[in-house]
Image: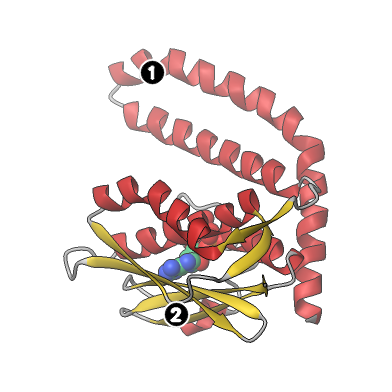
Amino acid sequence: IEQAAFQNDKLAMLGKIAAAIAHEIRNPLTSIRGFIQLLNPYLAEIGKQEYGRIILSEIDRANDIIYEFLNSSKPSAPMKQKVPVDLLLRETILLSESEAHMKGCEIHYENFAPGLTVAVDVKQIKQVLLNMMKNAMDAIQDVIGERKGAIEISARPDGRFAAISIKDNGKGIEKRILSRLFDPFFTTKEAGTGLGLSVSYRIITNHGGTIQVDSKVREGTEFMIYLPNVE
Ligand code: ADP
């Protein structure tokens, strides 16, 4: 619990700093982006288009980080409403389907508890679920060719909680990095921001819930989200 509090404090502080400077950083990034595009023909002349492409994608990554931080660090009070877990999951699946299809990955969903209901900020929780789906698809991308990608989603009651499970058969997570997974900026991806899980963690703990992860290298990963359920 102490570590969780520390993580949330750290994230809130980083969020404030990011919000304060984001605007000032965005403007020069936008002009750098524009000028690099103007330089493209010259880079092509000397056979260095690749440099231009790298610069643009790195600028876009910096912009993504700023954008995600601004989005997640705003101290927006959760707008809670009662909603069936089934509805949250169906909408998440609907939004992930086309990307999953493109990436050759199947989504299976089983609702073991039709009456399961939570009181949550729907936008925030969907952000968490979509982020988990994206991570699952990324992990599957790395083993495609070895097996067919599959994401299994399920929900069931667990005491006073609704337990949502998102399980993939992707590359899995090495034990030595498990403890850093939820740290702000921790990423193993070339173009990752490392913000998805830290922000998700904060959203779920703000709802009085928790996240657990279980993983086996080369077999897959299961994320479990626990949210207080309501009658
Ligand atoms: P990002 O996706 O930008 O890297 P996240 O905070 O969402 O940021 O994830 C942090 C790291 O956790 C990822 O870089 C990846 O190494 C690991 N990870 C998260 N979800 C999964 C998953 N389903 N399978 C394997 N690794 C994962």
Q: Which residue is mark 1?
A: 40
Quick one: SS at disc 1?
A: helix
Q: Is residue 143 visible?
A: no
The image quarter in which residue 133 lies: bottom left
* Foreground pick, 157 / 12: 157
Q: Measuring from the top left, give residue 182's x and y in whole percent.
A: 62, 69
User: Where's the C terminus, which quadrant?
Assistant: bottom right
| Front tag of 2 and 1 | 2
Q: Amino acid at mark 1?
A: Asn
Q: Which residue is mark 2?
A: 174
Whether residues under marks 2 and 1 lie with C-beta atoms below 8 angstroms apart, the answer is no
For label 1, the crowd category at 10 Å Cα-Cα, with few meaning under 14, some 14 to 19 and many 20 or more, is some
On screen, 81 above or below 223? above
The image quarter in which residue 197 lies: bottom right
Alpha carbon distance from label 2 to label 1: 40 Å
Seen at 54% across and 64% down, the residue is 85
